[in-house]
Image (tube, rainbow, N blue to C red):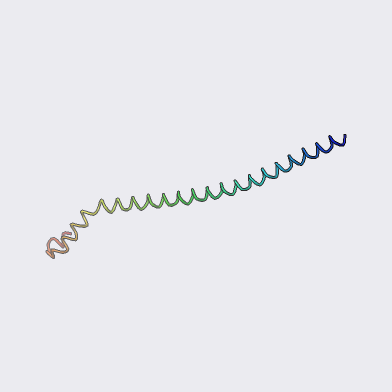
């Protein structure tokens, strides 16, 4: 009977130790997962910002020939072309 009592205590201690290890491992994984979510959120913000900058640049490039023409007109100092521009 005493031997069975020792085996049951050892078995209970083993499962208690296993549960504690699993709790610590879960907490560690939760922290790592939280950090990964923060990284993904920051990268999503950066991608959104880069898309905005790319669209603004595309609009500026689209208007570039018109601006070049205006610069050319301003450099000629022709009064009529200057007034038209």
Q: Residue 58 appears at what percent x and percent y?
A: 30, 50
Q: Give the quarter of the image for residue 16.
A: top right
Q: Tell me how many marks there are.
A: 0
Q: Residue 31 appears at what percent x and percent y?
A: 59, 49
Residue found at x 47% / y 52% = 42
Quadrant of the frame with the C terminus: bottom left
Quadrant of the frame with the N terminus: top right
Q: Give the quarter of the image for residue 26.
A: top right
Residue found at x 50% / y 50% = 39
Please state which of residues 40 and 72 is positioned toward the viewer in this rendering: 40
Up-down: is 37 above or below 9?
below
Q: In the image, 62: left or right of 34?
A: left
Pick out the residue farthest to the front. Answer: 3
Q: Residue 4 appears at what percent x and percent y?
A: 84, 34
Residue found at x 12% / y 62% = 80
Q: Residue 66 appears at what percent x and percent y?
A: 21, 54
Q: In the image, 30: left or right of 62?
A: right
Up-down: is 64 above or below 21?
below
Please state which of residues 70 and 41 is positioned toward the viewer in this rendering: 41
Please state which of residues 73 and 48 is positioned toward the viewer in this rendering: 48
Residue found at x 20% / y 53% = 65
Q: In the image, 11: left or right of 33?
A: right
Up-down: is 12 above or below 59?
above
Q: In the image, 73: left or right of 1?
A: left
């Amino acid at each position: 009977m005493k031997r069975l009592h020792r085996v049951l205590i050892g078995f209970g201690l083993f499962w208690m130790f296993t549960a504690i290890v699993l709790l610590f491992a879960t907490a560690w994984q939760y922290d790592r997962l939280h950090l990964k979510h923060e990284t993904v959120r920051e990268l999503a913000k950066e991608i959104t910002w880069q898309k905005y900058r790319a669209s603004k640049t595309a609009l500026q490039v689209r208007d570039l020939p018109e601006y070049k023409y205006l610069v050319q007109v301003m450099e000629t100092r022709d009064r009529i072309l200057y007034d038209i521009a």
